[in-house]
Image: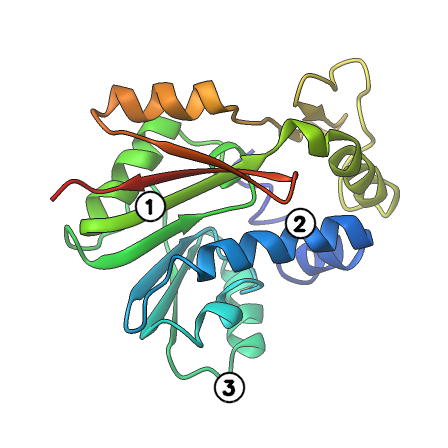
Amino acid sequence: MSGYYDDKLAAERLRRCYELASPRVRQYLRAEIGYVARKVGRGDVVLELGCGYGRVLGPWTARARLVVGVDTSLASLALAREELASCDNVRLVQGDAVRLGLCDGAVDVVACIQNGISAFHVDPRELMAEAVRVARPGGRVLFSSYAEAFWEERLAWFEAQAAAGLLGAIDYARTGGGVIACKDGFEATTFASRDFEALAASLGLEASLSEVDDSSLFCEIVKPI
């Protein structure tokens, strides 16, 4: 599954997924970007885990001193470089979100949105621990997943992607309860409030949970000073 976004859903194919989004899904996507932007202070260094083709980085550049995007897909990063050519405060890096290679406390805000904690198909505890490690003391770490109320819109969006040949056909026998499964092996799970809270607690951290736009569930951790 980790190779799915390197190969089948990279670059232009990934962008096509967002072009197929309904007006309600587009609202959800804007709400996530805006929520993170309001957490960014003037002069902050912001790191996005799983930046893809740079869809959310541009809107954050107006507030941040530097925005860094990390992704595993070279094809997606190449497209991001084209899309963000006019932004002089963006850096793009090919890398693994659980092994970032950054110094401790290197950034002010770490964001892993649009269900990256599930979509990356890595150990969530390792992912959260690495995100917290690279945040400065007092810095913010933000993860998001889907709100339960957004299920119908989310499923319809994935159905549209499957119909366009971007994903395998939906496997309805295995789809439900926050999980969308496809017949080609793709599977998208969801993190609930209790999952975020348990994960943070396992690392000795306190999570603050917020529902945004009736579509996203955000988990925010302020790194202890």
Residue 171 spot, x, y in % from top left: 80, 22
- Relative height, residue 133 to residue 152 (above, below): below
Q: Residues within 10 Å of mark 3 (few under 14, many from 20)?
A: few
Tell me the colour scheme of the image: rainbow
* Amino acid bearing label 1: Val
Looking at the rendered structure, the secondary structure element under dot 1 is strand
Choose between 154 and 83: the one closer to the eye: 154
Q: The N terminus lies in which quarter of the figure?
A: top right
* Amino acid bearing label 2: Tyr
* Amino acid bearing label 3: Ser
Horizontally, is 35 left or right of 167 in the view? Answer: left
Query: According to the image, label 2 marks what residue?
Result: 28
Q: Residue at x 33, y 45 (%)?
A: 141
Q: How crowded is mark 1: few (under 14 residues within 10 Å), some or many (20 or more)?
A: many
Choose between 159 and 32: the one closer to the eye: 32
Query: According to the image, label 1 marks what residue?
Result: 141
Choose between 142 and 165: the one closer to the eye: 142
Report how far apart the C-alphas of labels 1 and 2 lie in the structure.
20 Å
Looking at the rendered structure, the secondary structure element under dot 3 is loop
Which circle's residue, 1 or 2, is located before the other in the chain?
2
Query: According to the image, label 3 marks what residue?
Result: 86
